[in-house]
Amino acid sequence: MVGPGLYTEIGKKTRDLLYKDYQTDHKFTLTTYSSNGVAVTATSTKKADLIFSEIHSQIKNTNMTVDVKANSESNIITTVTAHEIATPGLKTILSFAVPDQRSGKVE
């Protein structure tokens, strides 16, 4: 039995409203810190049947910070930041990605 013309798609419209912004991706994040200033974060996201992962480690010293990220596409991105080494207020940033040989960048 079919309802009146205005109510024929009420079930579809209700379902679309309920599931409008619902995401089906699964994400898992694990972060651990050590007493000497090392932080390691592992992140994994499952989209459909694919799994994307990334490991991010950060080492902080008095004037230096080193960030290293490795992802499931075999890319490694490293950023070295030096705070106020020679002059107060001066920050030096060195960033590069492996295996891309042309990615080196200095600020």
Image: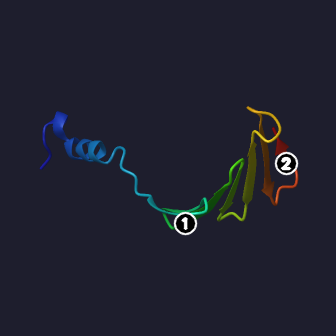
Judging depth in this view, the residue of 61 and 28 nearest the camera is 61
Q: Is residue 14 above or below residue 77?
A: above
Judging depth in this view, the residue of 81 and 48 nearest the camera is 81
Horizontal side of residue 101 vs 64, given as left or right? right
> Residue 46, percent across and down?
49, 63
Residue indicated by mark 2:
104
The local crowd at label 2, few if under 14, some if 14 to 19, many if 20 or more residues have their Cα within 10 Å, is few
> What residue type is disc 2 on?
Gly
Horizontal side of residue 93 vs 48, given as left or right? right
Q: Secondary structure at mark 1?
A: strand
- Marks 2 and 1, how far apart at CA: 28 Å
Judging depth in this view, the residue of 41 and 39 nearest the camera is 39
> Residue 19, percent across and down?
31, 48
Q: Which circle marks residue 51 in the picture?
A: 1
Q: Earlier in the sequence, mark 2 or mark 1?
A: 1
Residue for point 56% across, 63% down? 35
